Image (tube, grey):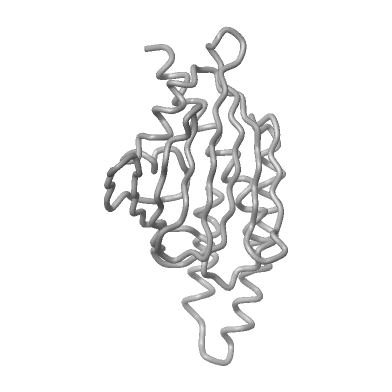
Amino acid sequence: MFARFISGCWTRLSGRRTGAAWPLLALIASELLLSVAVIGAAVSGGAETERLEVAVEPQGGVRATAQVLFPATSAVIQSLLTDYQHWPELFEVRMKVVQVLVRDGVATVDLRIEHPLMPGERKLVTASTILPNGGLVTDLTGGDFKRYHRVWKLQSIGEGTQTRADFELVVEPHTFVPDRIIAIVMRQELETHFRIVKQKALEQAKR
């Protein structure tokens, strides 16, 4: 609902843009997005993440780090993270997989993303490798982003029926939207992402 509301506001603004008025419309849109994002972040206060920090990078882009506890084995979490064809199911943002190519232990995934902060369809091509002790490293190889680096590190805890995941994500898309707005929206979207992964992990663990 939050994403659809932002998208609708952006469409109404961008549909009226003219050459001279465009910078003003962009500023209004950015401030509107920030206001809505703050409200959305407050509403999502019941997040299931044990720790999540999101900050703007001095050199540009946004960095997020988190530690999440999953109610399933590391094998279950690993299988979800490496099910590349079904990555879109782990996110609330609309996206589709155009191609997956696995060669010599490297999975190249070509995604198309429709995000309310970035009108139109954006291309994200990444290469992922599995970490020896469990987890996944994903790096940018092409598309409409300046930087994209994501790391999942998995560790079994308790009697092996739970998993502690250390997560890091650095993102810098090609967009005029200020990083501070991207940071606020990213926080909410990661909370949702972690919640979806937890739900799917529970479903698999019960099978």
Q: Residue at x 56, y 16 (%)?
A: 162
Q: Residue at x 54, y 56 (%)?
A: 5
Determine which quarter of the picture holds residue 177: bottom right
* Foreground residue among 70 and 181: 70
Q: Residue at x 44, y 66 (%)?
A: 144
Determine which quarter of the picture holds residue 110: bottom left
Q: Residue furthest top?
A: 159
Residue 40 point in image, percent of width and height:
65, 48
Q: How many marks?
A: 0
Q: Residue at x 50, y 27 (%)?
A: 133
Would you say 142 lies left or right of 6 here?
A: left
Image position of 176 with respect to 101: above or below: below
* Foreground residue among 1 and 170: 170
Determine which quarter of the picture holds residue 9: bottom right
Residue 118 point in image, percent of width and height:
50, 65
* Foreground residue among 128 and 167: 128
Residue 131 point in image, percent of width and height:
47, 34
Residue 3 point in image, percent of width and height:
52, 52
Would you say 118 lies left or right of 185 here?
A: left
Quarter of the image where the C terminus is located: top left
Image position of 25 with respect to 119: above or below: below
